[in-house]
Image: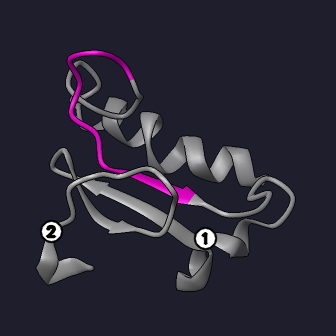
Amino acid sequence: MTPMQAIVASTSSAARLLHLDDRLGTLQPGKLADVILVEGDVLGDITRITNPANVKLVLKGGQAAKNLVAAQLPTMPALA
């Protein structure tokens, strides 16, 4: 499985299998989404996702749970 296939399998394909693809699984207006921003080329090296030092931004429930980027976003103190 390629890195892109792994990402698709764990997002949009999983949502479709659970019949939740109308609400989640892809980044689209109106859908629920938790998002991570990873430094580096995850398609070239999928293991970059597993190293917390490479995870620069985590958006959960519409708020920044971790924010190590220049953008100013509200942070949830318990998860920072």
Can I make out residue 1 in this image? no
- Looking at the picture, which amino acid does disc 2 mark? Met
Give the image location of residue 68, x and y in percent: 48, 69
Q: Tell me whether circle 2 and circle 1 mark residues in contact (CB < 8 Å).
A: no
Q: Which secondary structure lies at badge 1?
A: helix
Give the image location of residue 61, x and y in percent: 15, 49
Give the image location of residue 65, x and y in percent: 26, 66
> Which residue is disc 1 drawn over?
49
Give the quadrant of residue 67: bottom left
Q: Nearer the viewer, residue 56 or 45?
A: 56
**Image depth: mark 2 or mark 1 in front:** 2
- Looking at the picture, which amino acid does disc 1 mark? Ile
Does 55 lie within the magenta span? no
The relative height of residue 29 versus residue 39 in the rendered view (above or below) is above
The relative height of residue 47 versus residue 23 in the rendered view (above or below) is below
| 49 left or right of 74 in image | right
Q: Which residues are magenta?
A: 28-37
**Sequence-wise, which precedes: disc 2 or disc 1?**
1
Can I make out residue 33 in this image? yes
Q: CA distance from mark 2 to mark 1?
A: 21 Å
> Which residue is disc 2 drawn over?
76
